[in-house]
C-alpha cells in the first residue's frame, strides 16, 4: 500500500511554545489530507480536512487559529499547534488520499506539553 | 446523521480462540467500508476494504463480511494471536462527498 510518513513520532514541548508536525505522502500525490486527534482509549477525532492549495476545513470545536494547517503541495501537509498547553497533549494522526481512493494513515505523533 | 456504531467496546479472549467484532452504520449513500487495526501509539493500518457489492473479504486470519441491506459488517478473527491485541476500527465512506465516518473501535486483548 501507499506510504504516509509523519514526523516527528514523539515531541515534548514547553507550555506556550509552538510545535509543527509534518505529514508526507511518499509515493503518491495526496489531493486531500486529514488531521486527527486521539486521546487515550478514545477513537480518532477528525480535526480538519485540507485540500492542496486551499484553506483547511475545520471541524466544529477545533480552533483554526490554534491548529494551523498548511497543505502547500501534493505531498506535504503540516499541522502547527500554536501556544501549546498541557491539554493539547494527545496523539495526532494524519491521513492522505488520492482522488476518491483509500486513505492511508501516518504513524502518528505523540505530543506532550509540559 | 451519519453514524458508525461498533460492538463490543472491548473484548478479552484467550490466545488461539476466534472472535467476531460488529459494525453497524447509518451512512447513506454508502461508498465503502474499511476495517483498520490500530496498535497502541501507532496509526491505523488497513485490513480490508469492501464495496457495496462485496459480501465477504479475507485477509489472512481476518475475514470481513458486509450486508449492505441491513447496513452491518463484521470482522472475524480466527486463531487469535497475542499480536492481535489492538483497537479495531470500522470506517465508512460517504459516497459523493468522500467523507469518512469512524466508529469508536473495539479494543481487543488476546491473553496467553
Image (tube, coloured by chain):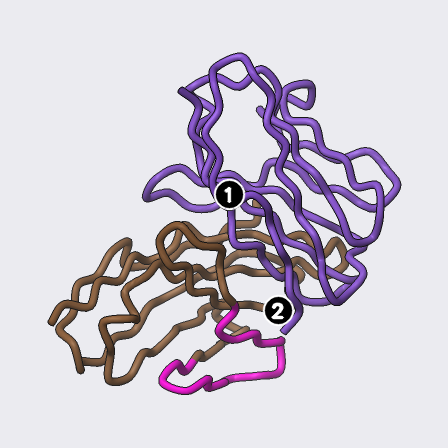
Q: Where in the figure is residue B70, as x and y percent of width and height? A: 48, 70
**Residue A109 image label:** 1
Which residue was labeled with disc 2?
A: B32
User: Could you tell me which residue is drawn at 35 percent across and 58 percent down?
Assistant: B87
Q: Which of B33 and A82 is in front in this view?
A: A82
On whether disc 1 and disc 2 are found on a single subunit, the reply is no
State whether residue A108 is above or below residue A83.
below
Colour purple belongs to chain = A
Mark 1 and mark 2 in contact? Answer it, CB < 8 Å: no
User: Could you tell me which residue is drawn at 40 percent across and 37 percent down?
Assistant: A39
Colour brown belongs to chain = B
Q: To which quarter of the image does residue A20 belong?
A: top right
SS for callout 1: strand
Quadrant of image for the N terminus of chain A: bottom right
**Residue B76 image label:** none
Q: Most prominent secondary structure in the magenta stretch?
A: strand
- Hey, which residue is sitting farthest right in the picture? A53
The magenta segment: B46-63
**Residue A20 drawn in magenta:** no
Q: Which of A30 and B50 is in front in this view?
A: A30
Quadrant of image for the C terminus of chain A: top left
Q: Could you tell me which chain the residue with mark 1 belongs to?
A: A
Q: Where in the figure is residue B109, as x and y percent of width and height? A: 22, 62
Q: Where in the figure is residue B78, as x and y percent of width and height? A: 28, 84
User: Could you tell me which residue is drawn at 23 percent across and 71 percent down?
Assistant: B82
Q: Where in the figure is residue B21, as x and y percent of width and height? A: 33, 68
**Residue B49 drawn in magenta:** yes
Q: Is residue B84 left or right of residue A45?
A: left
Q: In this view, does B73 lie to the left or right of A105?
A: left
Amino acid at each position: 500500500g501507499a506510504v504516509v510518513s509523519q514526523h516527528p513520532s514523539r515531541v515534548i514541548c514547553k507550555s506556550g511554545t509552538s510545535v509543527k508536525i509534518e505529514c508526507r505522502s511518499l509515493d503518491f500525490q495526496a489531493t486531500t489530507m486529514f488531521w486527527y486527534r486521539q486521546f487515550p482509549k478514545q477513537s480518532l477525532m477528525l480535526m480538519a480536512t485540507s485540500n492542496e492549495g486551499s484553506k483547511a476545513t475545520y471541524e466544529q470545536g477545533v480552533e483554526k487559529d490554534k491548529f494551523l494547517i498548511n497543505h502547500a503541495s501534493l505531498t506535504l501537509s503540516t499541522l502547527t499547534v500554536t501556544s501549546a498547553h498541557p491539554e493539547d497533549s494527545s496523539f495526532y494522526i494524519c491521513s492522505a488520499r488520492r482522488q476518491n481512493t483509500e486513505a492511508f494513515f501516518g504513524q502518528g505523533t505523540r505530543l506532550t506539553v509540559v | 446523521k451519519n453514524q458508525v456504531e461498533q460492538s463490543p467496546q472491548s473484548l478479552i479472549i484467550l490466545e488461539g480462540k476466534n472472535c467476531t467484532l460488529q459494525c453497524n452504520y447509518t451512512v447513506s449513500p454508502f461508498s465503502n467500508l474499511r476495517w483498520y487495526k490500530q496498535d497502541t501509539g501507532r496509526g491505523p493500518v488497513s485490513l480490508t476494504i469492501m464495496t457495496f457489492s462485496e459480501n465477504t473479504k479475507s485477509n489472512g486470519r481476518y475475514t470481513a463480511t458486509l450486508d449492505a441491506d441491513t447496513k452491518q459488517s463484521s470482522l472475524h478473527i480466527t486463531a487469535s494471536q497475542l499480536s492481535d491485541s489492538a483497537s479495531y476500527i470500522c470506517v465508512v465512506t460517504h459516497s459523493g462527498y468522500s467523507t469518512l465516518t469512524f466508529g469508536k473501535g473495539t479494543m481487543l486483548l488476546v491473553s496467553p
